[in-house]
Each structure stands twice: as C-alpha cells, then as structure tokens.
Image (cartoon, rainbow, N blue to C red):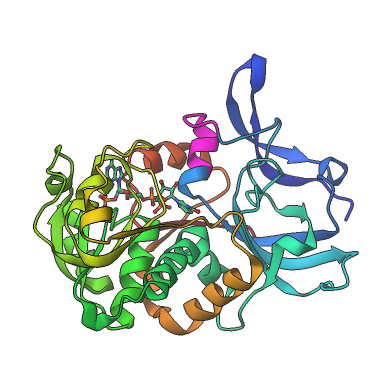
Amino acid sequence: MSENFRAVLISGGDSGHSAEVADVSPAQLPEGDVTVRVACSTLNYKDALAITGRGSVVRSFPMVPGIDFAGTVEESANPDFAPGDRVVLNGWGVGERHWGGLAEYARVKGEWLIPLEEAFTFEQAMSIGTAGYTAMLCVMALERHGVTPDSGEVLVTGAAGGVGSVAIAVLAKLGYRVVAVTGRPEESDYLTGLGATRILPRSDFTESGKPLAKEQWAGAIDVAGGRVLANVCAQMKYRSVVAACGLAAGMDFPATVAPFILRGVTLAGVDSVMCPVDERREAWRRLATDLDPALLESMTEKITLDDCIPVADALLDGTVRGRVIVPLT
Ligand code: NDP
C-alpha cells in the first residue's frame, strides 16, 4: 500500500487536546506484522473518552483511536494470516497505546487478531464490537459461577447502552428472565424488543442504600460501577453472581462487604482488553450462536469517520442508544 488514507487523529500533551480527521501516510503506521484494510470500526465508550479527552485513555500522541475493528488482511508477515483473511480485533491497548481502528488501515501484531466467524458480516461484527463481546464475557462469567435460567431473574444495568443491549439480547435468547435498568424510560419498547421482561428506573439504584436489601437477583451484569453497583450487590440473592465490567456511573465503589460475607455473593470482574485468546474465540463463537443477528439492526446506528468527533460527546452524555458503527469501505 502506498496511498495516503483517512484516520481520526488525536493530538495532545503540552499543546492541548484536539481531534480531527486527517490524511495519514502508510509510513506513519505503527510497527506490526499484519496490515488490515479496515472495513468497519465502532465508537465505544472508551473511544469517546479518548476523542473528547474526558478520560486519560490515550497513552501516547498522536493517536488513532478505535479499540476495535473488523476488516481484511492486506499484508502479512505472520504465518497465521494471509492477505484476504477476514479478521476482528478487540482491545490489547489498540486505540490507547497503539494506533487503532478509526482509520481506513491499521497495522497490528497478528497475535491480537482473531479470524472473524463466518456467520458475521463486517458490519454485524462491529454492531457487536467490544461492547457486545464484553457482554458475552459477562454472560460467560455468570455461567461459570453456576447461574442458569432456572436460578431467577438477571439484572442488567446501563440497559440501553452497547454492553447492556447485547447482554439483554443474549440472556433472553438463552432463556433468562432479564430485568433492565435504564435512565431512559423512553427506550422501554426498545428494551422489551431485545428481550427484557421488566424495566426498572435507574433512579432506584442511585441513592445511598442499605448494606443488605431484599434478595432479588440470581445474576447481574453491571456497566455502571459506583453507587449503582453497590446497590445491585446489596440486592443479590444468596450465592448469586455480579459480573462487573464498567464505570458509567463512576470508578468508586461505596459498598460494604455484607453481600459477600453474609450472602456469599460473588463479584466477578470482567476485562475484555487483555482477555486470553481462547476465551475471546469462545465469546465470538457463542455470539454467532446465542445472539439473534436480526436484533443487531435495531441496536445499531451508522456514522461516518467525520461524525465520530461530535458523536463522542453525545455518547458520553448517555444519549446514544445501543451501538455506533463506522463503516469504512
Ligand atoms: P454506552 O455509553 O453505550 O452505555 C453506557 C450506558 O450506561 C448508557 O447508555 C446508560 O444506559 C448507562 N449510564 C450512563 N450514565 C450512567 C450513570 N451515571 N449511572 C448509571 N448508568 C449510566 O457504553 P458501553 O455499553 O459501551 O460501555 C459501558 C461501560 O462498560 C463503560 O463504562 C465502558 O467503559 C465499560 N466497558 C468495559 C469493558 C471492559 O473490558 N471491562 C469493555 C467495554 C466497555 P441507560 O440510558 O440505559 O441508563
């Protein structure tokens, strides 16, 4: 490849934070043994933090954000990949420490790539994206700790967001009764369309609560952290499990140990970034079977590379529904 290509480029450091869509030369691509023609990327919560500078996500400048992408291998010096292979990437510090997917090309280490399941088009893969793959890791964490559809209701916070939307769809397809927590009651039809059986207002979870409350949930997937997570833990059933993956309500955790030591509740942390390859592949395999692809369209908004900068603010303000994908070809 010799031609310049387009990328979102973040500048920072002493000169101040800014983001623009720029023309980039292939010579500027970082080191890596596989170059991918990006077919589709996405705008995740972390990308929005990077683009707006509202969170210290970016480790070096200039940086191309984009913690995930799907595309076709263009050049490869890695024996596991050949030109033409369809691949997907999630995490590994891409878009934070290493140039990411919000660009027409990306150069990465082959070991970070996994072959894209045949079931998915590039756009479907990115409608799932890191948010959906993380939702699947959360479901797998609940299963690993023994939660089944017969255990009782499962709570999902941040329900109308990316992780929440996919979590609801997967849990419902697996036969769970899913209770969705949202700050957007106007999205109730959307959430029941994904498979939620009941909807609770976010405000039920935002006040300072008791260390232990009425036992209600057999499992929970929490994207909020902060007081929301503390209240979720206080409402968990005996020996139930909370998969915690996010901090949309805050990094703090103003809780007591009561749910853990008196009710045997397990708090299972979920990280998608450095997750071992076998578990990633398993999560993508499961997504190919346990998520109804027809639902992806209702949870996906398409934007252009140029839109990423204004939409990043909206995403952090919690006004974007579901997933935001950025087709590049
Ligand atoms: P989105 O922005 O798509 O969704 C977040 C949702 O959280 C919002 O839609 C909103 O849902 C809810 N929310 C927003 N603000 C608050 C608040 N103050 N209190 C409670 N809920 C709130 O983000 P994603 O779904 O992509 O990501 C969710 C979280 O998970 C983020 O913190 C992200 O960083 C994290 N994450 C972590 C990963 C990991 O590897 N651990 C991987 C991917 C994401 P509603 O309007 O329905 O209430």
Please tell me which residue is depicted at 39% across the width and 79% down the height of the picture. Answer: 294
Is residue 233 visible in the rendered structure shown here? yes
Residue 2 in percent (x, y) is at 89, 51
Out of 80 and 41, give the one closest to the viewer.
80
Q: Residue at x 28, y 60 (%)?
A: 265
Quadrant that contains the C terminus: bottom right
Q: Is residue 285 magenta?
A: no
Note whether 104 is above or below 300 in the view shown: above
Viewer-closest of 129 and 135: 135
Q: Is residue 277 left or right of residue 57?
A: right
Residue interval drawn in magenta: 47-56
**Residue positioned most to the left:** 214
Quadrant of the image occupied by residue 176: bottom left
Q: Is residue 53 magenta?
A: yes
Q: Residue at x 61, y 55 (%)?
A: 274
Rendered location of residue 71, percent (x, y): 68, 66
Main SS category, magenta section: helix
Q: Is residue 242 left or right of residue 105?
A: left
Using the image, determine if residue 241 lies above or below residue 116.
above
Q: Does residue 219 show up?
A: no
Where does residue 66 sit, x and y in percent of width and height? 60, 48
Among the 4 quarters of the image, the one containing residue 116: bottom right
Q: Quick one: quadrant of the N terminus? A: bottom right
Q: As rendered, which of 129 and 222 lies closer to the eye?
A: 222
- The residue positioned farthest toward the front in the image shown: 261
Residue 270, image x, y percentages: 46, 57
